[in-house]
Amino acid sequence: MLSARLCRLFRPSCSLLVALVCATWLSSCGRVSSGQAPSPALVEALGQGVNLSHWWTGPEPNAVLGSPYVLSEGELARVREQGFRHVRLPVDPARLFESDQSAVLRQDAMARLRADLEAMLAADLAVVLAVQMDSAAKQRLFASGGQAAQFGAQWAQLAGNLADFSPDRLVLEILNEPEIDNPWAWAPMQRELLATIRREAPRLSILVSGAHYSDPVDLAMLAPLPDRNVIYGFHFYTPHNFTHQGADWGWEMWQRMRGLPYPSSLESVESAVKRADPGARPHVEHYGRQQWTRDKLAAQIELVEQWAGQYGLVVQCTEFGVIRQAPEADRVRWLRDARGLMERAGFGWTVWDLTGAFAIADRDQGQLTFDPAMLDALATR
C-alpha cells in the first residue's frame, strides 16, 4: 500500500498511481451509508467562504485589550457583503475546557462560543466549526495514555451543546490537520469520533479529512465513511515553496525563500536564485525546474475529483491560500487558478484567511478593508 509520505516523493507523477491504488482498496470497502445527505442549502452556502483564524485559537484574549481577530457584527456583515457565504472558525479545545480538568467544559466559554456562532449566522453566514489544537496536543492523541478517549469525551460535550443549531447552517469538523503520516492510524480514530459526534448531534453535517496535513493525496487515501451526512475536506497549498515563502514556521527553508514567482520556470526564478543564500539556492532552482502551472495544479484537484465522483461524495476545500510575502501579481494568479479549479471540480472552498499571514483583508483602526485584487481573484462579487 502506498503511503501519503511515499507518494510525496514521486509527485506529480504519483497521481495516477495513487488513484489506481485507492480505487482497488476503496472498492473492497463497499459503499455503506446511512442517514440523510448534507443539506442542499448548506452545500450551496459552502460554495465560497473565508477562514477566521486566531479568533478561538491561541491564548485566551486579554479581558481589557480583547483580541484583534474578533469581528464585530458590522464586520461580519462586511464579510457577507463581499459575497462570502460561509466562514470557517478554528476552535482550540483548550479555550473551552478547564486547563487542569480537560474533560470539564467551561460553561462561560461555551456561552461565548455560542454567541459568536449566532452572530455569524445572524450575518447570513453559514459556519464550519473546526477543532484545531496545537501540534503537541495532536501528538498526544496518537500516543498511549488515553488522550484519544479524552478527546472523544470533549467532542461529545461540544457536539451536545451545538446540536440545536440548524443543519442548514452549521458543520462540525472533527480535527484540523491531524499531522500523523499513517492514514491507518488516523482512519479508525476518526471513525470513532464521527460516531461519538453523531450520537450527540444527529442532524448536523460532520466534516472529515485525511491524515497528515489533509492534502489531496491524504484525502484520496481515506475510505468513504458509513454516514451519508458527511463532507470530505482537504487543504490545498501546492506548491508549498511558493505559497509559504517567507513563513517563519514549518520548514525553516521557507524563511529563506523570497520572490518566488507563479507560474515557475528556470528563467522566471533567476532573480530569486541570485537573492537567495547558498543554502536556499538549490531549492529555489528546483522550484523553477518543477514548472508549476495551472495544468499541474489541476492534476492534484482532479485526483480528488475522480475519487469523490466514484463514491458520490460532497467535497470541500477547507483551506487554500498564499502568504502575503509572495509577489502580489503571482499571488493573485495562483488564487485565481486554484479557485477556478475548485469550482470546475464542483468543490466548495474556504480561502485561508481573512486577516492573518495569508490575509485577504486588513483591519486598520477597527475598519475591515478587503484587498480588491484578492476579491477579484476569488470572484466573490
Image: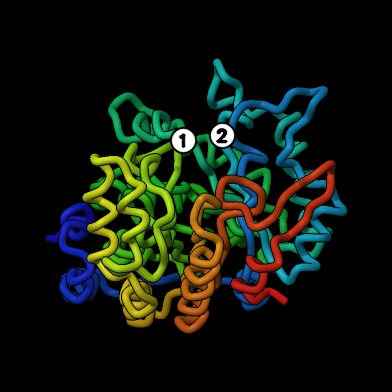
Looking at the picture, how far across and down is residue 374, in whole percent? 63, 66
Query: Between residues 324 and 187, which one lies in front from this camera angle?
Result: 324
Instruction: Determine the residue positioned at 45% across, 81% down.
Output: 345
Query: Between residues 266 and 301, which one lies in front from this camera angle?
Result: 266
Q: Where 40 sits versus 234, above or below?
A: below
Quickly name the residue at label 2. 93
Instruction: Kindly report the distance in space between the C-alpha atoms of the residues bearing marks 1 and 2.
Output: 9 Å
Quickly name the residue at label 1. 151
Query: Between residues 236 and 222, which one lies in front from this camera angle?
Result: 236
Q: Are marks 1 and 2 in contact (CB under 8 Å)?
A: yes
Quarter occupied by residue 95: top right
Looking at the picture, how far across and down is residue 106, in whole percent? 68, 27
Q: Viewed as shown, does residue 83 lie left or right of 216?
A: right
> Can residue 311 be seen in this snapshot?
no
Instruction: Determine the residue positioned at 64% across, 57% down.
Output: 360
Q: Viewed as shown, does residue 47 lie left or right of 33?
A: right
Q: Where 40 sits versus 89, above or below?
A: below
Q: How many tags in the picture?
A: 2
Amino acid type, residue under disc 2 in the picture: Pro
* Neighbours of disc 2 within 10 Å: few (<14), some (14-19), many (20+): many
Query: Between residues 144 and 365, which one lies in front from this camera angle?
Result: 365
Quarter occupied by residue 111: top right
Instruction: Determine the residue positioned at 34% across, 37% down.
Output: 252
> Can residue 174 be seen in this snapshot?
yes
Looking at the picture, how far across and down is residue 324, in whole percent? 55, 52
* Neighbours of disc 1 within 10 Å: few (<14), some (14-19), many (20+): some
User: Where is the N terminus found, in terms of image quarters?
Assistant: bottom left
Callout 1: helix, strand or loop? helix
Q: Residue furthest right?
A: 74
Instruction: Determine the residue positioned at 59% across, 41% down.
Output: 91
